[in-house]
Image: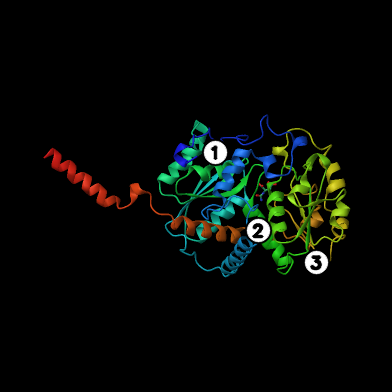
Amino acid sequence: MSKSETTHAPTPNGAGIFSAPGGPSAFALAATRGAVMSRAAADLEDEVASDGRHLLALEGMTRDELLELIDAAAREREWLAKGEPNRTSLAGITVVLAFIEDSTRTRTSFEIAAQRLGANVVVFSSAASSLNKGESLLDTVRLFEAMGSSLVVVRHPASGAPAWLARQLDRMGVINAGDGMHEHPTQGLLDLLTLHDAWEGRFEGRRLAIVGDISHSRVARSAIAGLTTLGAHVTVCGPGTLLPADVEMLGCEVAPTIEEALAGADAAMALRLQKERMERALLPSFGEYARVWGLSPERIALMAPHAVVLHPGPVNRGVELAHAVADGLRARILAQVANGVAVRCAVLQRCADATRREPLPPSLQDSATAVRATTSAYNEATR
Ligand code: NCD
């Protein structure tokens, strides 16, 4: 179907446009992309995935593409650390940050990254916009496209919403800042950069243990996709109610206990309990969770001596991580945050470069000449 024939589906002004019919039940959740988003949404994503204007998912990216972005982010990090004045490499580019779901670190780090590269930044959230008056997300983003914006960074509760937007827009690039339970590719890249540092650049044969709410976690999906492509192994563990039934299909192993997952691991990633995405009580209590699945000093001692601890934040202290672990020597939580700005600089630059290569739409090519011609034709005819 060509773009002009596409019917405009009602806008994802809330969760669920791409969820399975009847809505996902947490117990029925499966791991694969086909389980967290509809076939139609997955097809849309495949259609636009290779377009360099967009960054929608780490699944499907090649090893070279991932390493290139990690490399670019490491260069941006060096530049950021020098505290030099803002660059002008994104001068003339307007980046819209459309966050239709809460965010602190992702939104602010995209904002800082875009400003450091000299872009104009527009921050737009559902709370203070016409989305509240019923305007669709697509219509709203098209406004920004008409105003000359080049990139939109989207966070949305519906899995697949950024791919859907990318397919509908004519010129703008779309960067996924977290879509439902699907992916969070810039988080995945910053996790890769953090592990690249901890593992001295070698991913092959290393092993990350991911602990917690795998079912609802877009962070886990992006990390698993990126790490397995780079040759690392991932072991997941968590309460049975928060593990997708077929999680091995993502290319990872499942450990029955946290102790088995951590034994000898080269890193651990604790995930936040995503209360907002749980449809019913899946846990007896947070206290019980902390006792059985929390990262304590005794448990992290089971890992390899060089192993580090990651958490995407926000952290429920005392639940996923003991205070002593969150503040301990192995924690890389603030390094992840710092790496987030560098990764977002690299991604914005890559996507902006690709949008600049797009030809102007025919209606704008030589528009001054066209306006002059129609004006003089009109003047002639009405003289
Ligand atoms: C994550 C998210 O929103 O997906 N946070 C983040 O972006 N740093 C994880 C979470 O909310 O638990």
Residue 266 visible? The answer is: yes
Amino acid bearing label 1: Ser
Give the side of residue 112 with respect to residue 233, left or right: left
Q: Residue 281, which numbered label? A: none
Q: Label 3 belongs to which residue?
A: 306
Circles 2, 1 touching at the beta carbon (< 8 Å): no
Q: Examine the rendered structure and indicate whether residue 287 appears above or below residue 206.
A: above
Mark nearer the N terminus (1 vs 3) = 1
Q: At which x and y percent is residue 194?
A: 69, 62
Residue placed furthest toward the front: 1
> How many numbered markers are drawn?
3
Task: Rate crowding at label 3 as few (under 14), some (14 to 19) or many (20 or more) other CA atoms within 10 Å.
Answer: few
Residue placed furthest toward the top: 22
> Observer-nearest residue: 383 or 52?
52
Q: Residue at x 25, y 52 (%)?
A: 369
Q: Residue at x 82, y 38 (%)?
A: 283
Amino acid bearing label 2: Leu
Label 1 vs label 3, nearer the camera: 3
Q: At which x and y percent is residue 7?
A: 49, 34
Q: Label 2 belongs to which residue?
A: 190
Give the side of residue 240 with respect to residue 344, left or right: right
Q: Label 1 belongs to which residue?
A: 126
Mark nearer the N terminus (2 vs 3) = 2
Give the side of residue 50 with respect to residue 27, left or right: left
Q: Which structural element holds mark 1?
A: helix
3D distance between C-alphas at marks 2 and 3: 19 Å
